[in-house]
Amino acid sequence: MALLRKINQVLLFLLIVTICGILYKKSHRGSVPKSDADEDSEVPEDMEDEIPVVICAAAGRMGATMAAINSIYSNTDANIVFYVVGLRNTLSRIRKWIEHSKLREINFKIVEFNPTVLEGKIRPDSSRPDLLQPLNFVRFYLPLLIHQHEKVIYLDDDVIVQGDIQELYDTTLALGHAAAFSGDCDLPAAQDVSRLVGLQNTYMGYLDYRKKAIKDLGISPSTCSFNPGVMVANMTEWRQQHITKQLEKWMLRNVRENLYSSSLGGGVATSPMLIVFHGRHSTINPLWHIRHLGWSPDARYAEHFLQEAKLLHWDGQHKPWHFRTVHADLWESWFVPDPAGIFKLRHSR
């Protein structure tokens, strides 16, 4: 009986210890501090309704960025947060331009892009050196720059938004697609591009089909291309599919094998995206990317057509802050003067 009593006492003791342990864990579970990784994995409630818009601000084109931001902010009631990306030596100027102009009320974050990430990945032979500028490749690295958003809008700086950016943000991305673009064969009928000499709208215009690496892709040269200057991206899919690594792979292959060139379609950043996203991207409403306004100084479109357009893009070499193009007034109406007096309109007449 004495032995049985001792066994019962031991069992009772172990039961009490177990119960105390359970109660301790329950009472302290809520007080365990989260790690930084845990915090990054959850989107704060106040960010769920934000629409993140990523746009670059290059030193010589900063006026374009500010005009684009002005047009976006002025045409929506949505909660926009602008991620303005620049190089280190321009960050203070970006902040000054925003905080000392009519843009002071916008919600913005300035993001530094470190160009060393591009070392050894860009072939230095281009007929258009402007296309080799580091900020032209920011779109490749969106998940590394923007951490707390599931969906992101990326815009080139030479655009003007006339519609409510909420509509673009609401673009549906198909399951498994990391991005949506506007196809070059989906332009509205009113935008006749047949007279724009040298304009490319197929893969043939961007990739060198004489190279084995391009032939081995199995992509028809007549496949319609797309313009990555306006993009809606899903950051989760982008990370899971390792899109950045895939883009870097084709940048490195181009350095070694010269697979594409700016002398073709005019886009050393476009070509790797055409390869990586071939057959794996969703489509943006064509009215949200009316482009080629900068392809020729006399490119002219019907006024009623331009009024219906949601977004205008001055892609090409004839930028409205440098040239007196036919529709430059549509851009200039959104121009925000530089408080420092550095950026000035230089129209060539």
Image: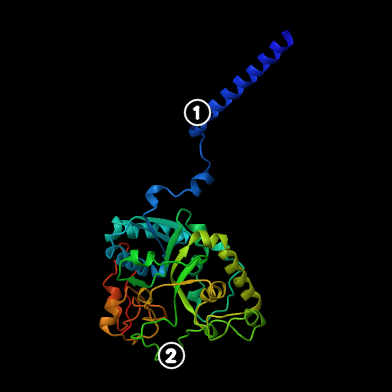
Q: Residue furthest front?
A: 1
**Left or right, 32 with reference to 313:** right
Locate the N terminus and report the quarter of the image it occupies.
Answer: top right
**At 34% across and 55% down in the image, what residue appears?**
107
| Depth check, front residue: 61 or 264 | 264
Circles 2 and 1: CB atoms closer than 8 Å:
no
Looking at the image, residue 74 sits to the left or right of residue 34; the answer is: left
**Disc 2 residue type (three-letter):** Val
Secondary structure under tag 2 reads: loop
The quarter in which the C terminus is drawn is bottom left
Query: How many residues crowd mark 2 within 10 Å: few (<14), some (14–19), many (20+)?
Result: few
- Relative to 244, 333 lies left or right: left
Q: Residue at x 49, y 75 (%)?
A: 131
Residue 197 shows which numbered tag? 2
**Percent coordinates x, y for residue 38 in the rendering:** 52, 45
Alpha carbon separation for disc pair 2 and 1: 73 Å
Quarter of the image for residue 104 reads: bottom left
In the structure shown, which secondary structural element does the residue marked by tag 1 occupy?
Answer: helix
x and y percentages locating residue 234 in the rendered image = 48, 62
Is residue 90 visible to the viewer in this orientation of the structure?
Answer: no
Q: Which labelled disc corresponds to residue 27? A: 1
